[in-house]
Image (cartoon, rainbow, N blue to C red):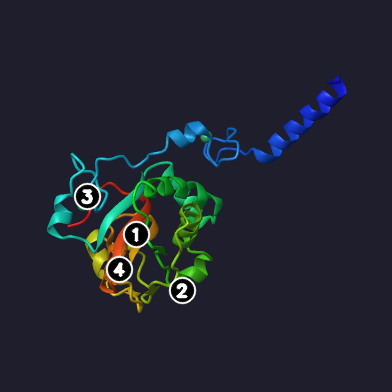
Amino acid sequence: MSNFIAAILNSCTNFTRTLLSQECLLCGGASGHDLLCGDCANGLPYHRVPACPICALPTAGGETCGACLKHPPAFNRTLAAFDYAFPVDALLHAFKYAGQLPVAEALAQPLADLARTRPLPDALVPMPLHPARLKERGFNQAMELARALSRKLNVPVLADAAIRQKDTAPQAGLPWKERRRNIRGAFDCRRNFTGKRLAVVDDVMTTGATLGELAKTLKKNGAEVELWVVARTLEKTHV
Ligand SMILES: [Zn+2]
Ligand SMILES: [Zn+2]
C-alpha cells in the first residue's frame, strides 16, 4: 500500500473515531460509544445481594425482611440496579432536573440486565407525574426510563395504566411517617388488569410509600405488581 493511501486511510480512521467517541460523563476520559468509561462504569454502586426480594433492603442471607413479613406490601418484588449513592445520585439528578435524557439509556441498561434474569412482565408502568408537575418539568423521568427499558426488553409501556389525581406535596420534604398519609388515594386506575403482571418503573425508591400506593391501586384492579427502580436507598425506613 502506498504511503499516500495509508495516510488517507489513517486519517479516515481517526476522523471516524473522533465522530463516534465521546467523553465519559463522570471523569471526562475517553468512553468510546458509551456515556461512561469502563473504569467509571465498574466503580458504580451496583445494588448487591443479599437483600429482601420484596423491598430490596439488605438482609443477612437474602431472606424476606421482617417488615415485609409483618406488613406484606402490594408489590411482590423489587429490582434495583444501584444503591442510591454517589455518583448514581448525581447522575439521576442530572437526568431528572437538567433533562439529560441520554443518561436514561445508561441508567436503564443494568436494570434491563437484571430484569432479563427473570420472567418478563406483560407491561411496564412508569410512575405517573401529576399533569402540573409534568408541565413544570417538561418530561417524566420514569417515562423516559420505561421507554429505554421497553426498547431493550421488548416489553410494552402502558403510559395510562393509572393517573395521578392528587398533586401531592413533594415526598422529599416530609418526614417518613407522613409520606404514606400524603400519598394515600393519589392514583386512579379504571382498567381491568386481572391476570396481568406489571412492572412499575421509577428512578429512586426511598421509603417505597409512593411506589407502594401505586402498586396497591394496580393490585386492586387485578394486577400482580413488581417494582423496577434504578436506585434504592439503603436506610431501613418502612414500619
Ligand atoms: Zn470515566
Ligand atoms: Zn422487605
Quarter of the figure with the N terminus? top right
Q: Residue drawn at (60%, 33%), measured in percent from left and top?
A: 30
Tell me the CA gap for discs 2 and 1: 19 Å
Query: Horizontal and vertical percent for residue 224?
Result: 28, 64
User: Sequence-wise, which precedes: disc 2 or disc 1?
Assistant: 2
Query: Label 4 is placed on what type of residue?
Result: Gly
The kind of secondary structure element at disc 4 is loop
User: Sequence-wise, which precedes: disc 3 or disc 2?
Assistant: 2
Residue 196 in the figure: left or right of residue 94? left
Query: Label 3 is placed on what type of residue?
Result: Lys
Query: Horizontal and vertical percent for residue 136?
Result: 51, 68
Q: Which residue is mark 1?
A: 172
Q: Are marks 2 and 1 in contact (CB under 8 Å)?
A: no
Q: Among all residues in the image, which is located at the extreme bottom?
A: 190
Q: Which residue is mark 4?
A: 195
Tell me the CA gap for discs 4 and 1: 34 Å
Q: Is residue 73 visible?
A: yes
The kind of secondary structure element at disc 3 is loop
* Label 1 packing within 10 angstroms: few (<14), some (14-19), many (20+): few
